[in-house]
Image (spheres, rainbow, N blue to C red):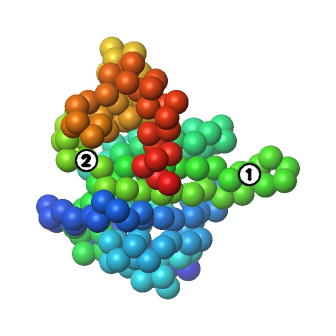
Amino acid sequence: MKILKRPAPINVEIPLDPKKTIMSKTDPKGIIEYANDYFMEISGYEEHELIGQPHNVIRHPDMPKVVFKWLWERLGEKKNMHAVVKNLAKDGRFYWVITDFEVKLDDTGEASSYFARRKAPPKKTIDLVSELYRKILSIEEARGVEVAEKYLIGFLEEKGMTYDEYIESICFTEEKKPLDMKDLQYHKRKGLFVRMFK
Ligand SMILES: Cc1cc2nc3c(=O)[nH]c(=O)nc-3n(C[C@H](O)[C@H](O)[C@H](O)COP(=O)(O)O)c2cc1C
C-alpha cells in the first residue's frame, strides 16, 4: 500500500468544536483501522486515504519525539495515557488536541487495539505545552532524544508529577485556575478526564 506523503506545515490553526470528539482506533502497530467523521472533517482526509495508514500520517514536525517514545512505552506496558498533541492536517494546517489513549486487551491479555479520543484543550493549556515542547524539540535537535528526555524528566521531577499529572494540572477548572496537586487528587477521585471524555 502507498504510504501517504505528509504535507509541508503552514502556521494556520484549525479551530475545533469543544463539544466534539476526534476518535481513531489502530492495530497494535499503530495502523489506523477506524476514524470517526470528525477526524475526517478536521484532518481533511477521506476514509479511503486514511484507513490502513500508519498514524504518523498526521504527525506534526513541532512534536518532540520523546512524547511518542513515552506513549509507545506506556502502551507496551498495556497502560493508558493522556497526552497533548499538535497534529498536521492534509492541507498543512495544525490542530491541538488533548488525547486519551486506551489499550484494549484480547482474551489472552494481549493488546488487540488502541483507541484515541481527542478533545480541544483550553487555550492556556496549549500555551504552556507548546512552550514546553518548543524547548524539548530544540534540545532534541541539538543534543538528541536521550538528552531531551532527561530534560523532560527533570522538568516533571521539579513539579513532583508524572507527565499525565502535569497535563491534568494544566487543564483548567471552571474558575479558569490551574489545578494544584490537592485539586488534582480531588478531580482524580471525581474523574476529571472521565467527565471530559464521556
Ligand atoms: C491509537 C493511537 C493514536 C495515535 N494518534 C496520534 C495522533 O493523533 N498524532 C500523532 O502524531 N501520532 C499519533 N499516534 C502515534 C503514532 O503512531 C506515531 O508514533 C507518532 O506519530 C510519531 O511518529 P514516528 O514514530 O514515525 O516518529 C497514535 C498512536 C496510537 C496507537
Query: Which residue is situated farthest in the right direction here?
Result: 108
- The crowding category of the residue bearing disc 1, from other C-alpha atoms within 10 Å (few below 14, some 14 to 19, many at least 20), is few
Q: Is residue 19 left or right of residue 24?
A: left
Q: Where does residue 81 sit, x and y in percent of width and height?
A: 52, 41
Of pointers 1 and 2, the one earlier in the residue sequence = 1
- The crowding category of the residue bearing disc 2, from other C-alpha atoms within 10 Å (few below 14, some 14 to 19, many at least 20), is some
Q: Residue at x 57, y 64 (%)?
A: 25
Query: Would you identify the image quadrant in which residue 64 lies?
Result: top left
Q: Nearer the viewer, mark 1 or mark 2?
A: 2
Mark seen at residue 81:
none
On whether ligand 1 comes within 8 Å of the CB at mark 1, the answer is no
Q: Secondary structure at mark 2?
A: loop
How far is mark 1 from mark 2, CA to CA?
31 Å
Q: Residue at x 49, y 35 (%)?
A: 190
Query: Would you identify the image quadrant in which residue 76 lies?
Result: top right
Can you say whether 184 is above or below 104 in the image? above
Q: Secondary structure at mark 1?
A: strand
Q: Quadrant of the N terminus?
A: bottom right
Tell me if I can see residue 124 in this picture: yes
Q: Where does residue 26 sit, x and y in percent of width and height?
A: 59, 63
Q: Which residue matches tag 2?
A: 122
Which amino acid type corresponds to the residue marked 1 in the rendered image? Leu
Q: Where does residue 129 sit, x and y in percent of width and height?
A: 26, 39
Q: Which residue matches tag 1?
A: 105
Q: Where does residue 177 sit, x and y in percent of width and height?
A: 22, 31
Tell me if I can see residue 133 in this picture: no
Q: Residue at x 35, y 62 (%)?
A: 19
On whether ligand 1 comes within 8 Å of the CB at mark 2, the answer is no
